[in-house]
Image: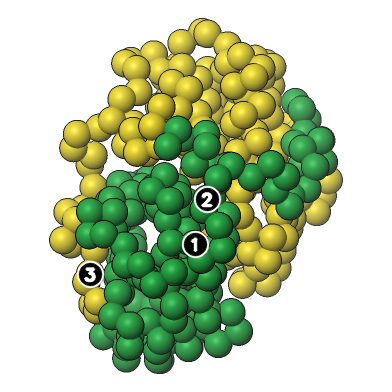
Chain colours: A green, B yellow
Amino acid sequence: METWDAIRARRNVRQYTDEPIPDEALERILEAARISPSGGNQQRWDFVVVTDRQTLKELAKVWPQGGTHIASSAATVVLVLPVEEELRPRLIDNYDLGQATMNMMLAAADLGIGSGHSAATEQDLARKLLGLPQDRYVAYMIGFGYPADRPLKPLKKPNRRDFDDVIHRERW
Amino acid sequence: METWDAIRARRNVRQYTDEPIPDEALERILEAARISPSGGNQQRWDFVVVTDRQTLKELAKVWPQGGTHIASSAATVVLVLPVEEELRPRLIDNYDLGQATMNMMLAAADLGIGSGHSAATEQDLARKLLGLPQDRYVAYMIGFGYPADRPLKPLKKPNRRDFDDVIHRERW
């Protein structure tokens, strides 16, 4: 898919078909995460990819308020960060994960694969399920799968603030 | 450009030619920021696009340690956030800006336009230059321009941690 089409076709997908994601497609999504830029190229991240149905069902409980789509995803990528007390590296870590997230989501959209964000609040459960060391935690999770509703194609009217409201020319 | 090529071609570009970015290309980069996803679709961001050479030279001083490429960029997009005391929304704001950043960088790479990150430490200067209200600050800046070194094309060996080091299968 052309890049500009993929950027406009990406949308939150939280209902997935039963179709698994081919290995080659999943490798490409993970490679997109790996090659993302990060502050000082520090790559202070790890990615755990989960496809086991039972684990996915348990992972969905890591964000009880909004992670139900993780249970039915074909694959979920868990975004892991080091536990960090200082504010500035925490902010940059989150910024960098946002970059990796979008790189993965666009690599997926290019292949017709939908994606949906999840937060992570139940850290003890996450650590137990994934065997994470105590000095790591789950920052976000991204569910992937083929959309159950309709194929991805460029959105005509995304639900966003108006261009002239959000974009300022030369100064505020 | 195909999406997967754009993802692999994006790299930090900090040396730009004198060629201006056509209006249509700049609009597309900004539209990519506008349509990016954000937590709860809150879009707690604003984007100030600067092309005036004198302002760009001054903006470069907003990050004296590493923002020199802003001065010679054809255009710089300034990523603005609300001043926020609470940790959790700050983290999500940064994550969301990371997503918007990558959307812009890939929209640019698709058009052969390079991009380079800058932090922002001199907030008083930034507010004065851009006329920002006191309840906003500059979180990051992204410089854009045509690469002075070589055209963008998919990188064969990006300087990153090995795939098997950063990617974990099913569990840590």
Callout 1 crowding tier (Cα within 10 Å): few <14, some 14–19, many ≥20: many
Instruction: Say what secondary structure mark 3 lies in.
Output: strand
Mark 1 vs 2, N-terminal side: 1
Amino acid identity at mark 1 = Pro
Give the residue drawn at x 44%, y 81%.
A71
Gap between marks 1 and 3 measured at Cα: 25 Å
Residue A156: % across, % down: 69, 41
Q: Is residue A53 left or right of residue B52?
A: left
Chain of the residue under the numbered disc 3 shown in the image: B
Q: Position of residue A90 (x, y in %)?
A: 48, 65
Badge 2 marks a residue whose secondary structure is loop
On the question of residue B53 being in view, the answer is yes
Q: Chain of mark 1?
A: A
Residue at 60% x, 38% y: name it: B32
**Residue nearer the viewer, A166 or B71:** A166
- Disc 1: which residue: A147
In front here: B65 or A169? A169
Q: Which mark is residue A152?
A: 2
Quarter of the figure with residue B85:
bottom right
Quadrant position of the N terminus of chain A in the picture: top left
